[in-house]
Amino acid sequence: MSSAATNEAAKEPEKEEGAAPEQNKRSPSDFLKAVLGRPVNVRLNSGTDYRGVLACLDGYMNIAMEQTEEYVDGQLKSKYGDCFIRGNNVLYISSQRR
């Protein structure tokens, strides 16, 4: 391989296999905006799940939910009209099928 060809290859950025095209990249913020007003599952650090409609959240991940159900070890424990969860207790938020 000539030195010119080697220099050209070094200048091209390497593409990762399976990498998504630029227009398909989504940030966590995009996800949270998309699920506002929709059913979600919120898992706490304790392992407890809360399923309901995401009403709002802030930058600290404090969450307000409506029509909320509390699940402990997969078993329904309680139902709440409104639920407020402090952000430091949240392990993750996932979308839920209707």
Image (cartoon, grey):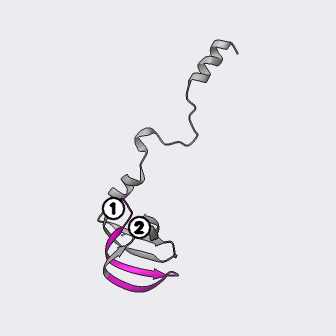
Q: Look at the image and say whether residue 59 sits in the magenta stretch.
A: yes
| Numbered label attached to residue 58 | 1
What amino acid is at disc 1? Asp
Number of marks in the rendered image: 2
Mark 1 nearby-residue class (10 Å; few <14, some 14–19, many ≥20):
few
Depth check: 15 or 42 in front? 42
Mark 2 residue crowding within 10 angstroms, few (<14) / some (14–19) / many (20+): some
Q: Which mark is residue 87?
A: 2
Q: Is residue 39 above or below residue 80?
A: above
Q: Residue at x 70, y 16 (%)?
A: 1
Residue found at x 36% / y 67%? 62
Q: Quadrant of the C terminus?
A: bottom left
Residue stretch in magenta: 58-80
- Picture layout, residue 27 above or below residue 21: below
Where is residue 9? Give x, y as percent: 61, 22
Residue 81 in sight from this viewpoint: yes
Classify mark 2: helix, strand or loop. helix
